[in-house]
Amino acid sequence: MSSIRSQLTVWYTVALLGTLLTFGIAASLVDRGARYDALDRRLTTEADRVARLMAQAEINGPDAVQELPSGAATLRPDLRSPLDLVADYLVVVDSAGRIVYGSAETSRWSAAASDSLRLQVFAVSASHQVLDLVLDGVPLRFVAAAVPSPRGVAPVLVAVAAGAPTRDIENAPQRILASMLLVSPIILVFAIGIGYLLSSRALQPLGRMMDELEAITDGRSLHRRLARASERGDEMDRLANALNAMLARLETSFSALRRFIADASHELKTPLAVMRVGVERSLTDPRTAPETIAALDETLQEVRRMTELVDTLLTLARVDEGRMELHTEPVELGTLLAEIHETAQILGEEAGLAVTADFASEPITIQADRARIRQLVLNLVSNAVKYTPAGGSLRLALTATAATATISVRDTGIGIAPGDVDRVFDRFWRADAARSRTGERPGFGLGLSICRWIAEAHGGSIAVTSRPGRGSTFTVTLPRSPAPDPVGAVESRAPTAEGG
Ligand SMILES: Nc1ncnc2c1ncn2[C@@H]1O[C@H](COP(=O)(O)OP(=O)(O)O)[C@@H](O)[C@H]1O
Ligand SMILES: [Mg+2]
């Protein structure tokens, strides 16, 4: 999100700077053209005026120029004075191709420079001609004009040229660019600010949509739909529509999946019960041959495991569908745990574990589903027994504060690796997944996900602390006052179908 925003900002800034640069270059080119036009008009007017002046019959005669001893020639002084008033560069060339008048600046030119100008002005044939020259390294533009001559008279003054340096015009684009560079930091800050604001505005509906999507965390919230920011059929609207359609399809397949699991588990229950009764009956039948008994015993164990699995799957499917309800009643936890402690002692004795209990002396009564709480604690106890080698110990504890009751099951077993602690409550997750589901520690990895659902459905929580090789402690915290909305709690806190 923030990266798209910064990308848009960068692109906006680049586009704005590019536009400004292009505009600056175009403007300076146009400006340059206009300046040259104005210069040409001025020089043409001046050259024309001087040419017409020189063309007057009484001027353009043999005595217009005075020969100098050096072989050069110069315009008669009285003719020079009006020309001295011209602000631009000015030269007058006579019929011998000599510069007979040059304005003040021309006197500083080298011989080569005045020669090249002289020849080009002398050669002018059309009425006007623009000459772009570089004289002594200075770029100059001249407009040369032929002096009109009355018919039949050989004119002495043949051409004039008015000129001006063009360095200012040539440098103008650089000056514009330089001033643009000077203001570019301001433009940059401005562009980044505007770009950031614009992209934030454009991405705002996307951010909202992502928030809404993130709130759809599991199969249970798939019924939610994204709000449509606009009904205009713009991109965001299309995206919301597409996502909503996808959510609808997901919802359909999720509920089909849940239905399937629920139906399949339900259908398996009866045949399993029939099998179990049949096997049990055969086991107790005195006519059963002793060598068959071992096989039947094994079958019975497997059938029991299957029944347990099917029960668990049915429970989880109902939880996912939101059809699992708690049958709450006042439950005195001390009594309940004392019963569980007895069971734990029997289990512990078989496994060679010492089982101890440490319960608060005063009665702790909470509003809860007795069977579910028993299932929860028994799950934890059977895990503790399963994952603690013989010789270890197991401790059941019950404490309470004004607001909560806390049940903890501590063992000195194999423990859980730090990286796995967050995953033990996931569905089908088992640390020893590589081992068979039967073997010395049979299980499906569903027990703790049921435990979590039960704790959360009661408005409580379950947590584990563990040190590998040293043991684990599972702690269940339950609120002492009834949960405000048990059904809502069931709905919103159910474990996810993905086993999240
Ligand atoms: N008391 C415990 N000590 C060590 N590991 C445990 C304990 N309880 C649970 N675990 C780990 O968490 C996994 C998931 O437990 P659970 O959901 O009850 O599944 P299962 O008992 O069927 O393996 C177990 O496979 C085990 O790796
Ligand atoms: Mg278990």
Image: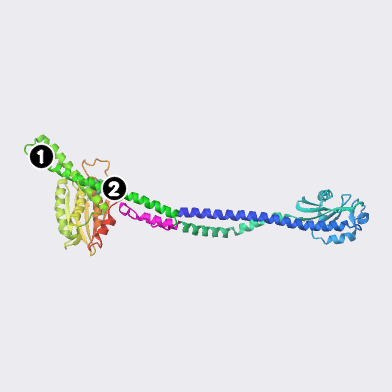
Q: Where residue 443 appears, x then y in whole percent?
A: 22, 45
**Whether residue 10 is visible:** yes
Residue placed furthest toward the bottom: 402
Q: Quadrant of residue 47?
A: bottom right
Q: CA distance from mark 1 to mark 2?
A: 39 Å
Q: Secondary structure at mark 1?
A: helix
Residue 216 included in the magenta stretch of the image: yes
The disc labelled 1 sits on which kind of residue? Ser
Q: Earlier in the sequence, mark 1 or mark 2?
A: 2
Q: Where residue 160 appears, x then y in whole percent?
A: 83, 54
Which residue is label 2 attached to? 256
Which residue is label 1 attached to? 282
Q: Secondary structure at mark 2?
A: helix
Point out the image quarter for the N terminus: bottom left
Q: Quadrant of residue 203?
A: bottom left
How many C-alpha atoms fall within 10 Å of the one at disc 2: few (<14), some, or many (≥20)? Answer: few
Q: Nearer the viewer, residue 154 or 285?
A: 154
Q: Which residues are magenta?
A: 203-231
* Residue at x-position 14% and y-position 48%: 349
